[in-house]
Amino acid sequence: MSTSANSNKERVFIFDTTLRDGEQSPGATMTLEEKLQVADALDEMGVDIIEAGFPIASVGDFEAVVAVAKQVKNATVAGLARAISADIDRAGEAVRHAKKGRIHTFVSTSPIHLAHQMKKTEDEVIEIIARTVTQARNLIDDVEWSGMDATRTPIDFLKRCVETAIKAGATTINLPDTVGYAVPEEHFRMFKSIIEGVPDADKAIFSVHCHDDLGLAVANSLAGVAAGARQIECTINGLGERAGNAALEEVVMALRTRGDAMPFYTEVESTHLARASKIVSAASNFPVQYNKAIVGKNAFAHESGIHQDGMLKNAETYEIMTPASVGIKETTLVMGKHSGRAAFKDKLKELGYELGDNAFQEAFVRFKDLADRKKHVYDADIVALVDDEVGSVGDRIRLVDMEVVSKTGGVHKCNLVVTIDGAEKAVSYEGTGSVDAIFNAIKAASEQDPHLVLYAVDGVTGGTDAQASAHVRLEMNGRIASGNAAEPDTLVASARAYLNALNRVMIERGAAAQGALAG
Ligand SMILES: CC(=O)SCCNC(=O)CCNC(=O)[C@H](O)C(C)(C)COP(=O)(O)OP(=O)(O)OC[C@H]1O[C@@H](n2cnc3c(N)ncnc32)[C@H](O)[C@@H]1OP(=O)(O)O
Ligand SMILES: CC(C)C(=O)C(=O)O
Ligand SMILES: [Mg+2]
């Protein structure tokens, strides 16, 4: 934003090509409605130029560029054209509907492209540039010229091309790293050499267009800007041909976050980034990888205990930008096997629990045990775990170990070890099924014979590693008590729910029951 904080910075224009280069990703084709939705999000966000398509490519592409041109309120709308007269006319016809239109025409410049794709000599290419840029300028004032595969082009020939394009009236000169081959220092040198070595270079804005084949698209874009380029071509979520283009959200946030190291700013409202990412992901059907910078699900999520502890003390310990600055509601502290006590305590507080020291330690040990066995620990798991823990405080009979042997059409046997008032007792008992064997073993160990009123099991959350939540209701001597337990293993949950209910009927029996248990 052009605030006083930006007064000593230079503006960099953001040219979004999600609807053109982004859509060239195999499988990313968007419908007209989707393109309009994406264009709307880009325009609202403050993107300077929206490349809406390649009008000669098809009737659908032409109509999409026309529709975007008519809809966009603020941004310039560009249409792509090869160095072919019909392409340029078609692009001009499409973008003339925009408040501000641009024809973007390109031709190959590298030896490999000239020899094999274009089958042209350098002199022929120079003539083509002069003719096609002039044609475009006769249709519209805003003309961008691109030298396809510029980064694999000998610098002296590239200078001739750029000089020719500027002379013919190009207002923007784009030097694409079409195949993602450049490295940052080299990219910097190429831009510096062209900008300093071409006559009238100051009559055009220089632009970077980087592909991510080596994962260097953003680094190369920033290197180009450091050398004097003032337009970055990029896409939301880094969508684009092959490994994609430089990601818009990354260049915008890099310039914003590291304004101290790079004295540039853009007019993009960064709080729109997360929403734009979602819209493009849905329209293109390309999921955003979890660890994607800025907009990935994990970009503002922390699971490890040391990081969570730091985050709770001061978010700047582990976050270099706020989630709000990119339109994400809040940081998430994900509870998992790497979490520590600080985050667990904070999560309990958020869930409305305040446990005493001992109960907290016990709950934490059980949480770690659960997290070791389960991929995702949800809030519901923690609630179940703590309710279980709180509900079993003061239990006289506790589970120590349990082994269940079950055979189809054969024996179901439970080998059980419990403590009763602190003393360990082991029993083995059979049943008509695994659960029946477990409940019989508990009755045998406790020397109690309650009537089972209800037994039910359901999942705390979804998935095969979800905790099972078991519910048991017992009746003994006219008293009824319920017990619940949640565990990843259904049989262990059942045993603990039964014990939970048994402890309660025994406690409710009060002093009369004391001593009735076998030691
Ligand atoms: C790096 C980039 O992103 S470039 C943009 C790439 N995007 C696309 O190609 C998407 C849209 N493309 C299309 O719909 C089609 O390829 C069209 C309509 C452009 C052309 O279709 P066709 O006429 O069937 O040609 P085809 O795709 O087979 O081959 C491309 C032709 O364009 C030529 N060409 C490629 N780039 C240029 C250029 N910048 N200027 C002039 N001619 C070019 C090729 O040499 C080839 O010509 P040839 O048939 O005489 O050998
Ligand atoms: C058409 C040009 C700008 C392009 O997409 C590229 O060279 O990557
Ligand atoms: Mg490209």
Image (cartoon, rainbow, N blue to C red):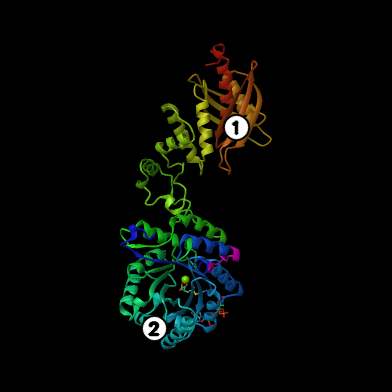
Considering the whole magenta stretch, tell me its main secondary structure.
loop
Task: From the viewer's side, name the closer residue of 93 and 62.
Answer: 93
Where are the magenta residues, as a range?
A: 23-33
Q: Amino acid at mark 1?
A: Ala
Q: Position of residue 230 (x, y in %)?
A: 37, 69
Residue 504: image quadrant is: top right
Q: Is residue 31 magenta?
A: yes
Counting from the top left corner in percent of width and height, residue 321 is at 38, 52
Q: Which numbered tag is attached to residue 422? A: none
Measured in 3D between alpha carbons, the distance from the residue under mark 1 to the one under mark 2, in whole angstroms, is: 80 Å
According to the picture, the residue beneath numbered tag 2 turns out to be 167
Q: Nearer the viewer, mark 1 or mark 2?
A: 2
Tag 2 or tag 1, which sits nearer the N-term?
2
At x 53%, y 29%, the residue is 388
Q: Position of residue 106 (x, y in %)?
A: 46, 78
In the depicted structure, whether residue 49 falls above or below residue 406:
below
Residue that badge 1 annotates: 470
Residue at 37%, 83% (x, y): give it: 160
Q: Residue furthest right?
A: 409
